[in-house]
Amino acid sequence: MDIAVLSDIHGNYEAFHTCVEYALRRNITNFWFFGDYVGEFGFPQRTMNLLYELNERYTCKYIRGNKEDYWLNYEASGRTLWSRYDSTTGSLYYTYHNLTDRDLLFFKSMKIMEEIDLTEKEKAVICHGSPASNRGRLLPDDEKTYEIMDSLNADIIFCGHTHIQREFVHNGKKVINPGAVGVPLQSMGKAQFVLLHEMKNVHEMKNVHEMKNVHETEGGYKEEFISLEYDIERELENFRLSGLIEYAPYWYKVTKQLLKTGNVSHGVVLSKAMELCREEEGECIWPHVPERYWEKAYKSIFED
């Protein structure tokens, strides 16, 4: 069984559709999804509909990311915290109000981690951030990450959340992060995911090109890291058509830079905006970050 492993779509339908079509052309009909399905881009229902279609036609596993908790917690809290026309929460407001009851129930049904027997001898854990929290981060050269790896009865941990495609090994155990489909970092603007190949299928590959990014695991699978170009301009046009540029103007500007270069995340710009806010006003408590600080932060990072 070969598997397509995708994380952090964030509503980027063009990237998502491109990755799915590629996997299907490679005759892969098993999909693992690691959360953060919508949240940054226009027309989130297009992404949700594709997720539902895949679930009906193929074998899929879905993990709940921290973005899914945003929508569920916002619903439970009375829907008062986010604002329209605000770079801090405008895209959250827009996305939530374009979700359906079916979507929220779908998110609620998901686990934050799952244990899987890849083979009789090889065990895996799949999650969004870390096995204990969908906000956690499994990072290389990090003692907390190594403690988590040592504590688990698993040979491989598959995770997302950091938006950086990578793998690393500690004490014979491996972490594999497929990167992000929708807003990857350090990807030169390409959508990223992983194909997981069962060893018996690897030997049947006829195209040598297919093998160049394949890394052998210690067990019965090999991972192939995929980076794909897609129609970024069409996805950015969806921002305009959906009205998201007005809902979250500087969030859009950061997204545009991120799609084209893959270097600076929204979190970096938000942190800078909050730092500037604290310097001038003494305190800055999310989500109340005035637009003028977003403007200053954006210009200091991208235009200085």
Image (cartoon, grey):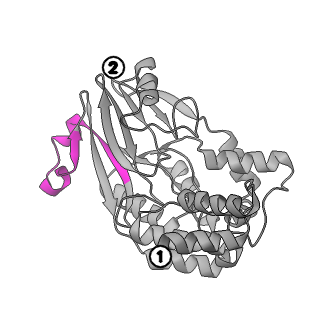
Residue 218 appears in the rendering:
yes
Relative to 257, 10 lies left or right: right
- Using the image as rendered, state which of residue 101 and residue 294 is in the foreground: 294
Is the N terminus in the top left, top right, bottom left or bottom right quadrant? top left
Image quarter of residue 154: top left
- For the residue pair 30 and 17, the one nearer the viewer reads as 17
Write down the quadrant of residue 91 in the picture: bottom right
Relative to 233, residue 190 above or below: above
Residue 90: x and y in percent read 71, 67
Who's the residue at 28% across and 23% down the image? 172
Q: Name the residue type under label 2.
A: Glu
Measured as percent of width and height from the top left, residue 110 is found at 62, 39
Query: Which numbered circle lies on residue 69?
Result: none
Q: Is residue 191 left or right of residue 46?
A: left
Q: In front: 14, or 248?
A: 248
Name the residue that disc number 1 marks.
304
Which stretch did the figure color magenta? 193-215
Q: Amino acid at mark 1?
A: Asp
Viewer-nearest of labels 2 and 1? 1
Q: Horizontal and vertical percent for residue 187? A: 35, 60
Q: Secondary structure at mark 2?
A: loop
As drawn, the label of residue 120 is: 2
Mark 2 vs mark 1: which is more N-terminal? 2
Residue 35 in the magenta stretch? The answer is: no
Q: Which element carries disc 1, helix, strand or loop? A: loop
* Above or below 82: residue 131: above
